[in-house]
Amino acid sequence: MQVLTYVLYIAIAIIILLFMVLVHELGHYIAGRILKFKITEFSIGFGKPIFQRKNKRGELISLRVFPLGGYCAFKGEEDDNETPAKDSFNAQKPWKRIIVFLAGITMNFLTAVLFSLILLCTAGYDLPQIKSNTITINNQPYVQTQLEEGDVITHIDGVEVDFAFGDTFQNLIAKKQAEAFEFINNTYGGIENAPDGQLEGYSFNVTINRDGKIQNKEISFQVIRSYYEGTNTLASENIYLCFSYSPYVYSFGEALLRCWEVAFGFAWVVLKSLWLLITFQLPISAVGGPVTTITMIASATQTNWLNLLILIPAISANLAIFNLLPIPALDGSHVVFTTIEWIRKKPIKRSLENKIHFIGLCVLFAFVIIVDILHFIL
């Protein structure tokens, strides 16, 4: 039963990835239709076709056996002919072709914006909102007096709570907790020697939004010891901030304004990761191909369905950035070649360009296979 359940989640993950591919290729298709390009085939997947049908415009609509990609094929797109037919892709003006190449990337990014909007309106994301300024340990309430229910924390010691352009709330609190323990060790020689109650001498600033008003508050940890029930035997000792929180859920108007920033944030995280990868600060095993992506989606969905609300905009932004890279066979590379043609008033030799893109495609396939294998063996 457990295996069947996981198979179901794998199927859901594949459908989601297919949806991402469909969105990307629809961008190329819609732009091509608007600009009067001759489209020969719109395909989801690669390999042997399992479904094909021609529409009234003569365009072949295909579903192929390997559903981990897709394409929108234009007449004469890969021809080596230096004098292409008038209705072929390469005969179109460079600016039109650049629009078509960028349309898939644009659709992926707009999908990231749309699902960021849904995420912010339904589950919230990075900003914490105080649920209660009291926690109870051993039937004893402990209060964080500086905070109130409904407060939204926006900054900690001046650092914005933002997963992309600042830092996450969890990371910031972990840093403050580490600083507090260092203070305790330096002052008392360890937490076992620290007095119960509010930690005197160490605090930090939080910026909050309270009913639309921005306020700054100084908060501190409390040293709390718990004992086994009915005894004086110490069970644990730790420091607490004495409040509980949940992600802030935005109103539709607020989400409409912030969803663009969140989508750009996901894209920025991808760019930062690429830089860390290029500069060898991130291991190659941190990158995943389509199999790894499907496994990740399935596992995250199995843990909590709400994770999909984060994964879909994140993966959409990832696809947009990835396809924008000037790597042969990707849209970004096609834009570069077409821009060079526009500037030079003549194209680079078509046969050479096609060979470069073919080699790039082979290298990309090899790369994603290797990184997927690394995920399974490391």
Image (tube, grey):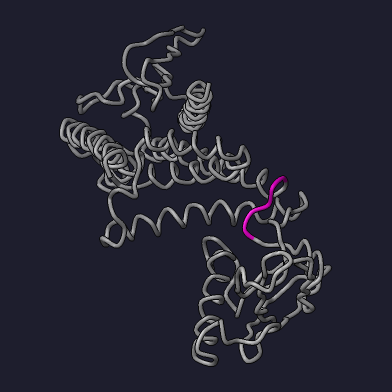
Q: Is 216 located above or below residue 240 in the figure? A: below
Position of 213 compared to 280: left or right? right
Q: Is residue 123 magenta?
A: yes
Whole-percent x, y for residue 70 in the image: 39, 25
Q: Is residue 244 magenta?
A: no
Q: Which span of residues is magenta-colored?
A: 122-126
Q: Is 289 located above or below residue 86 in the figure? A: below
Position of 69 compared to 243: left or right? left
Whole-percent x, y for residue 124 in the image: 68, 52
Residue placed furthest toward the front: 231
User: At 26% from the left edge and 40% from the top edge, which residue is drawn?
Assistant: 377
Q: Is residue 336 visible?
A: yes
Q: Is residue 136 visible?
A: no
User: At 35% from the left edge and 55% from the top edge, which residue is drawn?
Assistant: 274
Dominant SS type (magenta): loop
Q: Is 45 located above or below residue 319 in the figure? A: above
Q: Is 243 located above or below residue 300 in the figure? A: below
User: At 61% from the left edge and 53% from the top edge, which residue is drawn?
Assistant: 260
Position of 315 compared to 356: left or right? right
Whole-percent x, y for residue 109 in the image: 52, 44
Q: Considering the image in quadrants, where does the C terminus appear?
A: top left
Whole-percent x, y for residue 73 in the image: 37, 22
Q: Quadrant of residue 254?
A: bottom right
Please name whichever residue, 152 or 79, is drawn nearer the observer in this view of the structure.
152
Please name whichever residue, 362 or 202, is drawn nearer the observer in this view of the structure.
202
